């Protein structure tokens, strides 16, 4: 084989490998989220495909300002801006508003491009700063349908006093949350300062008194709180 023929063969092989890698990375996926809780609502969801070096949060670390705004007030706009600045491909608010207990979003299509990871976040209502978090999940290259059970995390940015509309809370107003009684004294709690698995709401059964604005017959949960279904095409 001549030098010219050898170089031509190498170029053809390299081109084929590049095309193959591009085909693997450019995944076409569909995603749906199901609310597994008895009485909690999810604020507008962020479904984000992004690079392997990027994460929306890290357990044990201090929450970013963007994560704090989502976890305390349901505002996903700062996370959208932050992820898209890093090349993420997002689907914002697939439920078209709050996702009720037991409900599922429609399957939404996402062309991930070169992104290999999937993250999904949303605030749980009513809480102080709880959120569901699928973080940096590797999108399979094998076509098929995959399900992931997702836990609730505490952003660690607000004390879990379980008071709705207090001076230290950004909890969204109705219709996203059921307002409690105004006579609750609040549960003694401190700001933890780091992201961790949420302990769950404590609540009580007193409508206009007690410690909590949350109803312990409705607003308590155990993990997992959500199920993410991903179809790789």
Image (tube, rainbow, N blue to C red):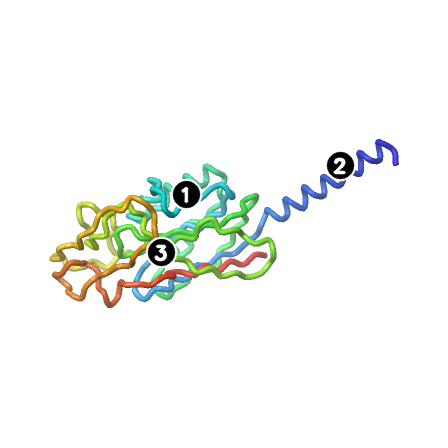
View extreme (top): residue: 3
Residue at 38 percent across and 55 percent down: it is 96
Rendered position, 61 above or below 226 = above
State yes or no: discs 2 and 3 in contact (Cβ < 8 Å).
Answer: no
Badge 3 or badge 1: first in the primary sequence = 1
Q: Give residue 155's position: percent from left, percent from top.
A: 32, 48
Q: Kindly report the distance in space between the C-alpha atoms of the residues bearing marks 3 and 1.
A: 20 Å
Q: Viewer-nearest of labels 2 and 3?
A: 3
Q: Which mark is residue 152?
A: 3
Q: Give residue 30's position: percent from left, percent from top.
A: 52, 56
Badge 1 or badge 2: first in the primary sequence = 2
Q: Which mark is residue 146?
A: none
Figure label count: 3
Is 51 on the left or on the right of 2, as rendered?
left
Tell me the quadrant of the picture where the N terminus can be found. top right
Who is closer to the viewer here, 52 or 30?
Answer: 52
In the rendered image, which residue does mark 1 sit on? 80
Element type where label 2 sits in the image: helix
Residue at 18 percent across and 49 percent down: it is 166
Who is closer to the viewer here, 12 or 191?
Answer: 191
Q: Kindly report the distance in space between the C-alpha atoms of the residues bearing marks 1 and 2.
A: 39 Å
- Local crowd at mark 2 within 10 Å, few (<14), some, or many (≥20)? few
Q: Kindly report the distance in space between the C-alpha atoms of the residues bearing marks 2 and 3.
A: 49 Å
Tell me the quadrant of the picture where the C terminus can be found. bottom right
Q: Viewer-nearest of labels 3 and 1?
A: 3
Rendered position, 131 above or below 19 = below
Element type where label 1 sits in the image: helix
Residue at 36 percent across and 46 percent down: it is 60
In the rendered image, which residue does mark 2 sit on? 11
């Amino acid at each position: 084989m001549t030098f010219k023929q050898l170089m031509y063969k190498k170029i053809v092989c390299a081109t084929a490998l590049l095309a193959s890698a591009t085909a693997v990375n450019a995944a076409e996926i569909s995603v749906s989220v199901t609310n597994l809780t008895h009485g909690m609502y999810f604020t507008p969801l962020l479904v984000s495909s992004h690079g392997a070096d990027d994460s929306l949060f890290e357990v044990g670390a201090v929450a970013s300002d963007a994560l704090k705004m989502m976890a305390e007030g349901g505002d996903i706009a700062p996370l959208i801006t932050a992820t898209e600045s890093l090349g993420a491909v997002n689907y914002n608010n697939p439920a078209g508003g709050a996702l009720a207990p037991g409900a599922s979003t429609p399957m939404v299509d996402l062309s991930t491009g070169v992104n290999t990871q999937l993250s999904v976040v949303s605030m749980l209502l009513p809480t102080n700063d709880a959120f569901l978090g699928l973080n940096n999940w590797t999108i399979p290259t094998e076509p098929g349908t995959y399900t992931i059970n997702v836990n609730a995390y505490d952003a660690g940015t607000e004390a879990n006093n379980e008071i709705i509309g207090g001076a230290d809370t950004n909890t969204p107003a109705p219709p996203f949350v059921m307002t409690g009684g105004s006579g609750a004294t609040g549960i003694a709690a401190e700001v933890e300062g780091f992201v961790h698995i949420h302990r769950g709401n404590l609540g009580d059964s007193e409508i206009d008194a007690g410690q909590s604005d949350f109803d312990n017959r409705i607003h308590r949960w155990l993990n997992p709180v959500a199920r993410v279904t991903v179809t790789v095409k």
